[in-house]
């Protein structure tokens, strides 16, 4: 019998209720929790090994978030019809949760921990990513896994000037600020998100409101833990330590490490110098004197010593590893149009970090399908970030993008997306690829800068440059703080906070912040954000010097897209039966044509690298959707010649009858020698047949009337259709009433397509020199 679950509930500011329960599902895990909001249900489990692996020197934490398609009543679209590896969206959420959970574990805890979070029921209006960390932390809270604190995570968005906690999916579409914030009840742990050029004060306010909401969720987790009766946390095997050996390492290496740290060396030189100190320390022992268990600690103790020495140097002397001032950006170098074949390219170098970025323009056929359990959306803006091992001088197997690459690429994409023009102004699918060629600190920010330059190089109407800078923070005793602009890789590793801020000159577009210290005050955060703003402006100034405005036109080899908007009822006419018309247009013009119905309009995109083919396709489409105007003059092509006249196509897909009596002012018994198929002829649309609604054309009205021309006398017609002698015209008799000589019913032949609204009121017909012989128009 399944036991009754233990649960707690609380409400958000807007009245929505969230419930956390445990004790019913996944009971063999060390801890499990089910978070419910509306129809959204997220199950989190945690399992930790009891002992670390032999020789383990790092904390092996794994956090995976996955959405089950059954949660939304859907079947996966893959060949195997089952959930496979995590997609980018799931990886991004996994990273957000991992970064928030990792600081909760003791530094000496090295047992393997696996946190699995699964969306088991979906709600179209509930964003699951804002509840994932709450579920994971709740599972840890009700377990005996030795975490030090309880945390939670919320989304905060600004919608129409109002800040909203965990907004609905519909509400989020209208937001100009969207941040995920993780925190304990006392300290902010992580911030990530995007905004449409918000200021620093707006960001701080959003973080404060999010923290207030998180405190409510942390309190609920403590209540759930007490209800379950979790008394304490498990004991674990702590790694071997030797304080005396650590003191010996400090005595040997402290001064040498300080001289290296203050030497303003390059990354490789500094790394080799630190390595030499460790090797010299090992060499100072006689053979057999250094115990194996102590030898295994050399790397850890030297790392801790380097961190301590460098941090004190920066706090006390305000000197950095490469000799820069705390707020100084490394030397910048950038160029655009550095590759001949891509549609746009840029090379951005900042110190020892370098990104080679390209822009490729495509059609709507190149859009990226972004599929989650609840949604299937297409994105026209794609950014891929590559971090090959040679960028850090390493040898590693190439196995596709790692989680870090997905996360850093997502930050760059969200930042640049804020300035991308609307589809009406730039209907291309845009793919940006950043290949990091060198890395020593914030290659993701180099990607933002290079991406902005490459977009302008491609001729995209990108209104403002977006730049980015990575910041660091080192805090010490007695309130000493060092805020570092444009951090190196080593500074990122040894600091208390690293955060990346992107934006324009006017405001913030993206942020990613990880805080590793306790009690970070609002004043320090504002100082760091202001220093980041100054650093970003310095980089943006250099970017504007390199590429002040986008290219006026696309590059000659770049494809062009023209967009036409038509009424919805003409979509079928452009496509044709079975796609016949649009396929013929693509075949004849060489252009790619896409049609999409948007509201009551049809949006047609014509794509080609050849301007002439685009113009040809445009004219073709305009002809199809154009409504013929009575009295307008056209140039047409004779499509067929019959005894009573010729059928002329004067607009694509639109034909009319040029009766033999309308060809010339001179009476013609035949059109032989006058017109033939394929002839170009200027005509005027003079009206429509009152019986059939077909279009009537005239050529002679555009020709000068012969001198002395006499209008032929009209023959009177008696009631019933006979002539003066009461006789009926043989040809009319054979066709009137729809019968033939043999009594067979003959269906009228269609010679042109008329879209809705094409027929106009018939006008008075011009005089003809064939007495009332217009019955052939019914054919």
Image: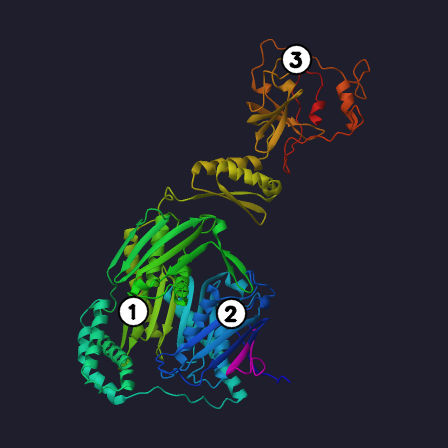
Query: Which comes before the other along the chain, label 1 or label 2?
Result: 2
Name the secondary structure under disc 1: helix
| Image point (25%, 86%), residue name | 246
Please give the name of the residue rendered at 55% of the width and 60% of the height, measured from the top-left corner. 79
Res 66 label: 2
Is residue 774 something that shows in the picture? yes
* Element type where label 2 sits in the image: strand
- Quarter of the picture containing the C terminus is top right
Residue 19 shown in magenta: yes
Front of the two marks 3 and 2: 2
| 17 in relation to 143, above or below | above
Say which residue appears at 61% left-offset and 84% top-offset: 4
Instruction: Report which residue position mark 1 lands on.
Output: 489
The extreme top residue here reads 708
List x then y, in percent, for residue 297: 28, 83
Q: Would you say 767 lies left or right of 200 here?
A: right
Q: Please give the residue where the numbered disc 3 appears in the rendered image.
A: 711
User: Where residue 655 sits: x, y (%)?
Assistant: 61, 29
Q: CA distance from mark 3 to mark 2?
A: 86 Å
Q: Residues within 10 Å of mark 1 (few under 14, many from 20)?
A: some
Q: Residues within 10 Å of mark 2 (few under 14, many from 20)?
A: many
Q: Which stretch appears magenta?
A: 15-34
Dividing the image into 4 quarters, which one contains the N terminus? bottom right
C-alpha span from label 1 to label 2? 31 Å
């Amino acid at each position: 019998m399944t036991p009754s679950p233990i649960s707690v509930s609380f409400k958000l500011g807007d009245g929505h209720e969230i419930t956390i329960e445990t004790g019913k599902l996944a009971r063999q895990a060390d801890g499990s929790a089910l978070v419910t909001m509306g129809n959204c249900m997220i199950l989190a489990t945690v399992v930790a090994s009891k002992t670390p692996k032999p020789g383990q020197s790092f904390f092996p934490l794994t956090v995976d978030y996955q959405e089950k398609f059954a949660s939304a009543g859907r079947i996966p679209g893959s060949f195997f019809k089952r959930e496979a590896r995590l997609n980018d969206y799931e990886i991004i959420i996994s990273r957000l949760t991992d970064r928030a959970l990792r600081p909760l574990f003791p530094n000496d805890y090295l047992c393997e921990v696996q946190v699995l979070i699964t969306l088991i029921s979906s709600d179209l209006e509930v964003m699951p990513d804002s509840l994932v960390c709450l579920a994971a932390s709740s599972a840890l809270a009700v377990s005996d896994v030795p975490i030090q604190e309880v945390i939670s995570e919320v989304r905060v968005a600004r919608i129409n000037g109002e800040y909203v906690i965990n907004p609905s999916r519909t509400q989020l579409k209208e937001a100009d600020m969207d941040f995920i914030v993780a925190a304990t009840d006392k300290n902010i742990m992580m911030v990530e998100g995007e905004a449409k050029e918000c200021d620093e004060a707006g960001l701080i306010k959003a973080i404060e409101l999010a923290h207030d909401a998180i405190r409510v969720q942390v309190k609920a987790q403590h209540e759930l833990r007490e209800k379950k009766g979790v008394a304490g946390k498990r004991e674990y095997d702590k790694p071997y330590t030797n304080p005396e050996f650590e003191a010996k390492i400090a005595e040997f290496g402290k001064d040498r490490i300080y001289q290296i740290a203050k030497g303003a060396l390059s990354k490789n030189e500094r790394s080799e110098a630190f390595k030499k100190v460790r090797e010299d320390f090992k060499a100072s022992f006689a053979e057999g004197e250094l115990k194996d268990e102590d030898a295994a600690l050399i790397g850890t103790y030297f790392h801790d010593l380097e961190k301590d020495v460098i941090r004190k140097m920066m706090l006390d002397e305000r000197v950095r590893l490469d000799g820069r001032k705390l707020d100084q950006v490394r030397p910048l170098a950038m160029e655009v149009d550095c590759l001949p074949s891509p549609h746009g390219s840029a090379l951005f170098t900042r110190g020892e970090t370098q990104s080679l970025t390209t822009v490729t323009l495509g059609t709507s056929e190149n859009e990226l399908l972004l599929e989650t359990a609840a949604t299937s959306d297409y994105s026209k803006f794609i950014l891929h970030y590559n971090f090959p091992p040679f960028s850090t001088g390493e040898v590693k197997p190439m196995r596709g993008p790692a989680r870090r690459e997905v996360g850093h690429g997502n930050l760059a994409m969200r930042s640049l997306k804020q300035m991308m023009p609307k589809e009406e102004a730039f209907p291309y699918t845009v793919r940006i690829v950043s290949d990091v060629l060198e890395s020593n600190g914030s290659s993701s920010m180099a990607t933002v800068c290079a991406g902005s330059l490459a977009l302008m190089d491609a001729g995209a109407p990108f209104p403002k440059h977006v730049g980015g800078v990575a910041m660091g923070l080192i805090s010490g005793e007695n309130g000493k703080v060092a805020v570092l602009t444009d951090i190196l890789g080593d500074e990122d590793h040894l600091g208390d906070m690293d955060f990346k801020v992107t934006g324009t000159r006017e405001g913030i577009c993206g942020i990613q912040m990880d805080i590793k210290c306790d009690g970070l005050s609002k004043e320090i955060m504002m100082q760091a954000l202001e220093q980041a703003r100054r650093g970003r402006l310095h980089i943006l100034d250099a970017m504007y010097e390199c590429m002040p405005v986008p290219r006026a036109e696309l590059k000659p080899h770049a494809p062009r897209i023209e967009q036409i908007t038509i009424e919805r009822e003409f979509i079928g006419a452009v496509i044709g039966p079975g796609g016949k018309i649009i396929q013929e247009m693509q075949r004849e013009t060489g252009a790619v044509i896409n049609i999409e119905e948007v509201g009551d309009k049809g949006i047609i995109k014509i794509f080609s690298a050849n301007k002439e083919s685009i113009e040809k396709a445009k004219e073709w489409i305009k002809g199809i959707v154009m409504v013929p105007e009575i009295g307008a003059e056209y140039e047409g092509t004779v499509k067929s010649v019959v005894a009573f006249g010729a059928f002329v196509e004067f607009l694509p897909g639109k034909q009319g009858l040029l009766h033999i009596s309308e060809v010339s002012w001179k009476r013609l018994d035949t059109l032989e020698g006058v017109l033939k198929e394929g002839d170009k002829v200027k005509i005027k649309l003079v009206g429509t047949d009152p019986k059939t609604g077909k279009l009537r054309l005239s050529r002679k009205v555009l020709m000068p009337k012969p001198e002395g021309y006499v209008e032929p006398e009209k023959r009177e017609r008696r009631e019933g259709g006979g002539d003066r002698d009461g006789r009926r015209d043989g040809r009319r008799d054979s066709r009137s009433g729809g019968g033939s000589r043999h009594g067979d019913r003959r269906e009228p032949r269609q010679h042109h397509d008329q879209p809705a609204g094409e027929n106009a009121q018939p006008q008075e017909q011009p005089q003809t020199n064939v007495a009332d012989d217009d019955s052939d128009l019914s054919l």
